[in-house]
Amino acid sequence: MSNGLPDYIAAARPNPPDNRAPWYKNTAPAYAGIFLWFVFWLGATQAPNAGGVLSHGIWAPIVSLLLAALLCHTFYYVILGIMGQKTGLPLYIVGTSTFGATGGFIMPGFLMGVLQFGWLGVNTYFSSDALSKAIFSSDALSKTIPVNAKIIMVVWGAAAAFVGLKGIQYVARVATYLPLIPLITLIVLFLATVGGLGSFDASEFVALHKTAVPTAPTALSSFGVVAFIVTYVVGFFATAGAAGVDFGTNSRDERDVHMGGFVGIAVAIIVTAGLATLILAGAYGKAGIAAVTTEEGKMAMSAYDVIPAVLGTGLSKVVYLLLAIAAFPAACFSAFVAANSFKATLPKVNPFVSVGIGAVAAIIIAVMGWAADLTMVFNIIGASFGPICGAMAVDYMLNKCRWAGPRKGFNPAGWLAWGFGFVIGIMPNLGIPLPMAPVWAMVAGAVVYWIAAKAGMESEPMPFSPETGEVPPRAPEVQVD
């Protein structure tokens, strides 16, 4: 402890101005790379209902993506990005204002590290799926997970965790360019299928889906399409939204924060998921169900699934291999972020032990097939980090758009806000229907924090100088007669 502050806070230093760069060199490409990951556009159209998100045509999902992009950029990222830009301090330090100097060990620091292994599990599952399609067959994981795919998952997860701990600098050197692979894939697929968009018929697509999958639920309503896409996108983005604090520390000014988010988040969401939607519609409009149904009779419901039909078996294997390679840095970075989180919050635990345990859990999530349910996974992430984003934003605004500094112990207002938000966000996973649950989790976190703060439930701030790590003396109170 240093002057009453935990050592991890006392040792914090802001990122100096000399280390910062324009938005197009850091924030925008980093965020865009997240949304170019093929898992994002793989699941963007995969509602289980007949017709998926295309049950009402092309425009319903496109408008839904515009709304989701606005929510992610404006209500999850911007304020947290500005907090990072102004303070120069990382998320696990800035979050101590909302959750307390002691509570900050857990929230958001430790939680961010734990959830990285959920991401590692998702990456491991779908990257192994792509590799299986490239090496064995184009429909490797459609029904069950064969032994060879499980072996790939074990090797992939273990390798990503090891590289994340020991060799992340080597991955970082090429990671900047690898997102070009999924981007080029989307562009090629779009050019090959755009001719079918004029022939796409939503009602025929719904009927074809019911024929291929008789158990498919009834087609979504227009609002259902909006709710599915917003839930999916916001849930996917929630941890990255909170990490806007970290991205902000690399921004020179507020313009960098806004432009980096607008291009890297809003535009990237619309372009990647929008192209994926148009590709699926164009593939069916151009070729019909016979050409885009997978080998085992499963209905192809994503741009990822229609790759063999559009590009042919041979070229599709190469594309699946390249998509898996492009996803490997993201798996390594998940392990790297988790390791840094655990080093800060559990300094006495060897990172190989903490990350190793997490990697085993991630591999189990993949091998058991739990990672395949993206909507469930992203609901958990949205329920966990939506309230954090909402509460931190309100904490900042109540303090006249300044960071309040660490608060003593566990800040009750922050923990109440997170608890209420998490319960609301996790409802769909408990069988309680709640459209757009990740959004309401964020709203609940914001509203509850505001109410709790106004009720005097914030713990006392502990102002400190990040340049020295010391707590300056409090100014004496002035009595006015």
Image (tube, grey):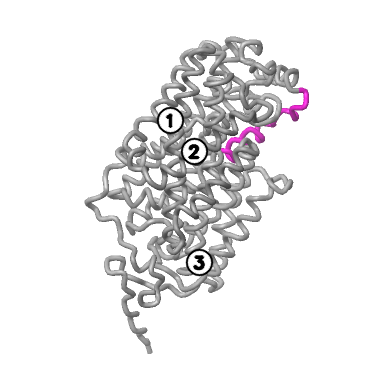
Q: Amino acid at mark 1?
A: Ala
Bounds of the magenta segment: 214-232
- Residue 62 vertical placement versus 449 (above, below): above
Answer with left or right where residue 259 lies relative to residue 370.
left
Q: Which residue corresponds to mark 3?
A: 103
Disc 1 or 3, which lies upstream in sequence?
Answer: 3
Secondary element at tag 1: helix
| Gap in angstroms between the C-alphas marked 1 and 2 | 24 Å
Q: Amino acid at mark 2?
A: Ala
Q: Which residue corresponds to mark 1?
A: 326
| Gap in angstroms between the C-alphas marked 1 and 3 | 36 Å
- Position of the N terminus, as image quadrant, is bottom left
Secondary element at tag 2: helix
Q: Residues within 10 Å of mark 1 (few under 14, many from 20)?
A: many
Q: Which residue is most to the bottom?
A: 481
- Position of the C terminus, as image quadrant, is bottom left
- Residue 131 vertical placement versus 164 (above, below): above
